[in-house]
Amino acid sequence: MKRYFARKTLCVHGHTHASSREASRCADLHLRERLGEITNLQVEPQFWFQIDGQPIKHLNGRRVGYKPDFTYTELPSQQDVAEDVKAKNGHMERDVPLRMAIFRHLFPHIELRVVK
């Protein structure tokens, strides 16, 4: 039996996050946005995977994609960033490394960061 100790946590901005670490990072990023260090902050945006303009789908018809915890644009470099907050022990679900690899290939202009 798998046991994960993360608990859903509401951040000060009203978003429900998978862990307190993620909720804390949300507050940090909102502060950075107010300070003008980043812009276009989004919480849990969805990226759908496509090859040759066709969506990749599971056998049951569901689309395949990746949902990082946050995306934003760093200033002044204008670098688009996707962030995923992970536990300090580095645990990731089995499919996460594959989804991250596909994301990096299909969206090379977005820097994917894992924050522990």
Image: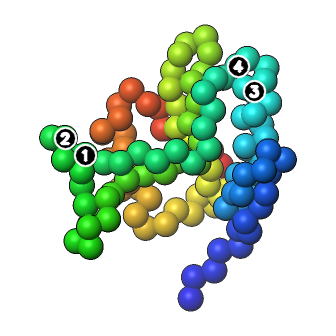
Q: Position of residue 10 (x, y in %)?
A: 79, 57
Q: Are marks 1 and 3 in contact (CB under 8 Å)?
A: no
Q: CA distance from mark 2 to mark 3?
A: 35 Å
Secondary structure, mark 4, is loop
Q: Are marks 3 and 4 in contact (CB under 8 Å)?
A: yes
Where residue 53 is drawn, which disc sits there?
A: 2
Q: Are marks 2 and 3 in contact (CB under 8 Å)?
A: no
Residue kind at label 1, given as amino acid type: Gln
Q: Earlier in the sequence, mark 2 or mark 4?
A: 4
Q: Nearer the viewer, mark 2 or mark 4?
A: 2
Secondary structure, mark 1, is strand
How crowded pointer 4 is (Cα within 10 Å; few <14, some 14-19, many 20+) is rated as some
Q: Earlier in the sequence, mark 4 or mark 1?
A: 4
Residue 39, visible in the rendered structure: yes
For disc 3, the marked residue is 32
Q: Are marks 4 and 1 in contact (CB under 8 Å)?
A: no
Q: CA distance from mark 1 to mark 3?
A: 32 Å
Q: Position of residue 91 (x, y in %)?
A: 57, 63
Where residue 50 is drawn, which disc sits there?
A: 1
| Residue lying farthest to the right in this orientation | 12
Residue closer to the observer: 78 or 43: 43
How crowded pointer 2 is (Cα within 10 Å; few <14, some 14-19, many 20+) is rated as few
For disc 4, the marked residue is 37
Residue 9 vs 50, above or below: the answer is below
Secondary structure, mark 3, is helix
